[in-house]
Image (cartoon, rainbow, N blue to C red):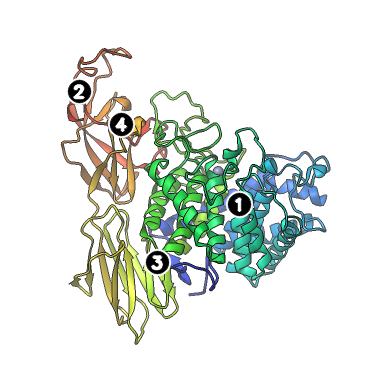
Amino acid sequence: MTENLGPVVPTADAIGKLHPAAAVRLDPDGLLGGWQQRNIDATLPHCVTQLDEYGNLDNLRRVTGDADGEFRGFWFADTDVHKTLEAAFWSGTASAFADETAALLEKAQDADGYLDSYYQDPVNRAKQWGELHFSHEMYTAGHLIQAAVAAARSAPDTPAAQQVVAVARRFADLLVLRYASSQEVDGHPEVETALAELYRVTGHRPYLDLAARFVENRGHGVLGEGRFGPAYYQDHEPLRSAAEVTGHVVRQVYLLAGAVDVAVETGDQELLDATIRLWDSALASRTYITGGQGSRHRDEAYGDAYELPPDRAYAETCAAIGNFQLAWRLLLATGDVKYADEMERVLHNGIAGSTAAGGTAFFYSNPLQLRTGHDGSHEDAPSQRLTWYSCACCPPNLARLMASLHAYVATGGPSGLQLHLYGSGTVEHGEHAVQVETRYPWDEQVTVTVASTSAEPWTLALRVPAWCDGARLRVNGTPARVEPRDGYLRLERIWHLGDEVQLILPMPSRLVAAHPRVDASRGAAALVRGPLVYCLEQADMPAGTVLEDVELSASSPLAVAFHTTGVAPVTLRVPARLRSSHEPQPLYRDLPAAPHGPSGPAATVTAIPYFLWANRASGAMRIWIPLAAQET
Ligand SMILES: [Zn+2]
């Protein structure tokens, strides 16, 4: 297996507990590997096509004189090109698109290293670097740099990769020249993590120093009030002293990711502790059960604590991706299993749900409920995925995440291997290698077969998700008495080629309630099995049933149904009451009158994994199901 490192490879000098495994491959017949293959087959080619169709590539060709017409799209439209290029490099499918785009970027770059097709437009040139609160110039530079990092790690010997790395370095050098002694920052974080990663690739310290400076510059009101106030772009308080996440979610999680990169590379434990404190604050009261974050559409922002309306969830796809990438950085830095747990949750729900089964349509915001008779407004609650967006940040972000997904499943070091996310494939680090076979999360068994020989003992660590009770192991068919420690089952021994470990992660279906302060979900329960959150969708309801009239009979057990065809391999059979829709009910009533009459007849309805919703006829959906009146 060839080395194929992904995003986030801390240097040998960095502080931290875990290191990415050197080589990981996901099998396309598993769920994770299937997503990765779909990305190669469908999402990535779709993104490339859309970049032409929506003018993103022409915007750059205008700079080189190879296209005319107006600039199209948002002023940061170049980032969609950069993210797609990053995805192409991670996926190993770098080809005509990568070659042509690398050449285009090189040709479009100014002599001083500047590259941003909106601000290279003669109409906008005079505004370069003059409106950083708004311009996204460094955000754009950051995504260019991340494409270069992917190029350098995945295909370093190809001309296209070398071209992209050279272009990104020239832009990064320009940033160093301009901002190494500046108090300024970009309104949209992103360049921090990119510069830290470029430092990791090149060893050039000024990139890391600039990333650290940008982290420190933020929080002193340098960006002004803007449209939504300084907290919108986390400029209201220095990150080191901030107590809670705030503002635009994607900006917050990207900033935190950059801060973690800076903290581990500079050995800054105080900064790392601050990022952990902020991450904890998000998870304590501002994260949906899907792992999505962001309750407010107006400014794409976190809401107040416990403000988590399912039907008006913003939960932008990019925020979920950023949360996943941040959790991975914190997992590497601390070794704390809670970050791997969160990666699993947001990946299997908030992120997976954003992409249609076919891989070419996407949600931008990800509601947890869609009402019957929804007015079709896409802004407040999208009822179906779209093939592209005028602000198309999410689809290429999905492409680059899925293209690099293999890099996030395992870590390795001299002491052995640690498996954090379960999908069929192979993991290799140094002398140690294993093969993983599983139908997880549909099935609770994960089989790990040792694929290396070593005379020395080493440790195989297997994550036990926080939701799992009674995890057990068999080694070569014999039960092994091991208790989870810090969230992992650890087996240390001299492993032989072909040794087989069977991990059983019991995953009964469960009912989950929200914190009582989450008013929007009070009196309701969510259905969960393993890492998957389930939902009710109109397509599965009995004829004539209005989804909002379905109540959960929580006193009866849920049943699990396995399928070889249909929308999902595993569905839940949910005991329910179908409240009558025929008798009109007043909107309000006096207490203590009976609550809108007794619940209606008993029925059993089907729940499907949330991530598969909206793949059939458009219709109502909900995750949080009201408990039948007598059972609350
Ligand atoms: Zn987005």
**Looking at the rendering, which quadrant does residue 601 occupy?**
top left
Q: CA distance from mark 3 to mark 1?
A: 31 Å
Asked whether, in this view, residue 401 is left or right of residue 306, the answer is right
Front position among marks 2 and 1: 1
Q: Which residue is mark 4?
A: 522
Q: Which mark is residue 516?
A: none
- Pick whichever of labels 3 and 4 is earlier in the sequence: 3
Alpha-carbon distance for marks 3 and 2? 48 Å
Say what amino acid the circle numbered 2 marks.
Gly
Q: Mark 1 = which residue?
A: 190
Residue at (19% x, 33% y) in the render: 553
Residue 453 visible in the displayed image: yes
| Ligand 1 neighbours mark 4 (CB distance < 8 Å) | no
172 up-or-down from 218: above or below: below
Q: Are marks 4 and 2 in contact (CB under 8 Å)?
A: no
- Splitting the image into 4 quarters, where does residue 94 fall? bottom right
Nearer to the camera, 554 or 184: 184
- Horizontal side, residue 475 vs residue 44: left or right: left
For the residue marked with disc 1, what is the amino acid?
A: Glu
Q: Give the amino acid at mark 4.
A: Arg
Q: Amino acid at mark 3?
A: Gly
Q: Quadrant of ligand 1?
A: top right
Please give the label number shown on residue 600: 2
Task: Give the residue number, with chain letter if any, for mark 3.
Answer: 425
Q: Position of residue 321 (x, y in %)?
A: 49, 50
Residue at mark 4 to residue at mark 1: CA–CA distance: 37 Å
